[in-house]
Image (cartoon, rainbow, N blue to C red):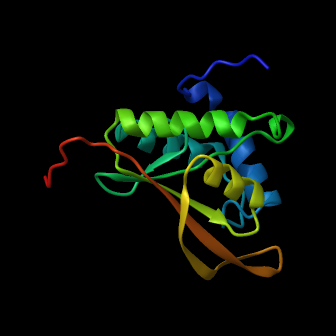
Amino acid sequence: MDYQLKLCTEKQLPEILTIYNDAIVNSTALYEYKTRTLNVMNNWYADKLKNGYPVVGAFDANKYTVEHSVYVRSDKRGAGLGKVLLREIVKKAKEQNFHVLVGVIDTDNKISINLHEQEGFVLSGIIKESGYKFGKWLDAAFYQLILKTPIKPTEN
């Protein structure tokens, strides 16, 4: 499969919206009930740009820790793109001098858990019954990867 990794632009927002809404409706990856609108995604994207984060699923948590997300369009799943995207997220996190990457994964999402474990992430905790969707309570597992960056951390 040929592909090129690149930063998303506003042109990709309708497709990102489709991917997110599929995750909302058909999975427990997002603990949201209502699908998003393009306007919501425009605001989401603008916020990412304003804070200097590439749209590869990285979200601001604090100076050295960042939460990430990996979503793949439903017809492209199973081809290894999740691994490619996660590795790119790790690479970008190192380049931006983050120290810890955090993935919050529904405990029933064994594919995502296995992917993260294969890439060196370790389980750091589970929040029981933190969401309710599809008629049941959902548990959120926190997976983390500690990076060797930054070389010289500061407190300011």
Q: Is residue 4 visible?
A: yes
x and y, in percent, of residue 153 in the image: 19, 48
Task: Residue 91: give x, y in percent of width and height.
Answer: 46, 34
Measuring 68% from the left and 42% from the top, which residue is drawn there?
17
- Residue 85 location, quadrant: top right
Kindly give the residue lying farthest to the right in the view shown. Answer: 75
Q: Where is residue 77, by image quadrant?
A: top right
Instruction: Name the residue located 74 percent from the left edge and 51 percent from the top edge.
Output: 21
On screen, 2 above or below 74? Answer: above
Q: Is residue 100 left or right of residue 44?
A: left
Quadrant including the N terminus: top right
The total of numbered circles placed on residues is 0
The answer to whether residue 63 is left or right of residue 34 is: left
Q: Position of residue 69 (x, y in %)?
A: 58, 49
Left or right, 136 with respect to 104, comes to right
Residue 53 appears anywhere in the view:
no
Q: Is residue 148 above or below residue 113?
A: above
Residue at 56% over, 28% down: 8
Q: Residue at x 50, y 45 (%)?
A: 43
